[in-house]
Image (spheres, helix red, strand yellow):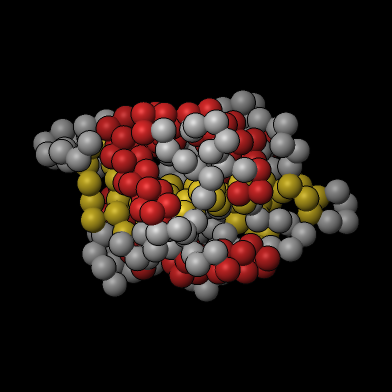
Amino acid sequence: MTAIEVKVFSDAKSLGSALAQEIIDGIDLAAADGKDYVLGCPGGRSPRTTYLALAALVRQRATDLSHVVIAMMDDYVVSDGKTMRSVDPSSHFSVMAFAQNEIVAPLNSAAPKGCGISADRLWLPDPSDPSAYERKLEDAGGIDLFILASGDSDGHVAFNPPGSDPSSRTRIIELAESTRRDNLNTFPEFKSLDEVPLYGISVGLATIREFSHRTVLLAPGPSKAQAVMRIKSATELDPAWPATILAECQKPSLYTDQSTPSIGSSEKPSTTT
């Protein structure tokens, strides 16, 4: 296993700019090689500065994104009494809506006309056939760069709760109460815990570990102090903090910033921009 590279940035904006630069360079290299570029993405707060910075770079470089795939890691699901289905994309907490509105739409707006990400290249797991997502990722050759995030209070990654099986694959998960409480902050339109869905569909820990060619976990801000402390010294998966799966991934990095208390103002920030 490779030691986790820890990079500390001055703030969340510079963190996002650094990762966006790596992503767009990877997009360009894939195009030059005639290959698709598969970017694994979470929804939520932590990656927002990366997505904004990436759109700005796409506009600046006039980058062709037609070979890019956006592979989301999870979404909420609800029961209709007989089967599970993804939540309505019009719901404020829909990961599909987040992906369309905060990732794909800004990127396509920034790309040259006719060079955006087509609708069939936005991927999410299907509750009616979770294992199909595994096959799809495998057929694509894996994920070129997987962006991860950690739950504030319980270290969930995607919807994998504490105690998740290290060999877990894409599946429907009953969400831990701690995860649902964290999501009150992720989606502030929730008025109470009762409004947070009880289930989600999610890639598993083995999915992340085995399909990622490069993995970067983003943990900016004061709320990520515990996550940074648990992850930065991990040498293997700690089942009590699933985001430590980062330690078992290829080319793992932890990106944080100086506002995170466990880093502190004395930590020299990365000069990467």
Residue 142, percent from left and from top? 49, 64
For the C terminus, the quadrant is: top left
> Is residue 172 placed above or below 180 in the rendered structure?
below
Residue 236, percent from left and from top? 34, 69
Q: Relative to the observer, which residue lies in front, 241 or 13?
A: 13
* Residue that appears at 26% across and 59% down: 4
* Residue that appears at 27% across and 32% down: 14
* Residue that appears at 42% across and 38% down: 63
Q: Relative to the observer, which residue lies in front, 76 or 264?
A: 76
* Residue that appears at 72% across and 37% down: 89
Note whether residue 187 is visible: no
Using the rendered view, name the quadrant where residue 113 is placed.
Answer: top right
Using the rendered view, name the quadrant where residue 49 is placed.
Answer: top left
Residue 237, percent from left and from top? 38, 67
Q: Specify whether 62 is left or right of 260.
A: right
Q: Specify whether 206 is left or right of 262.
A: right
For the N terminus, the quadrant is: bottom left
Outermost right residue:
82
Residue 262, percent from left and from top? 24, 42
User: Looking at the image, how many numbered discs can be counted on the residues?
Assistant: 0
Note whether residue 173 is visible: yes
> Is residue 206 placed above or below 191 in the rendered structure?
below
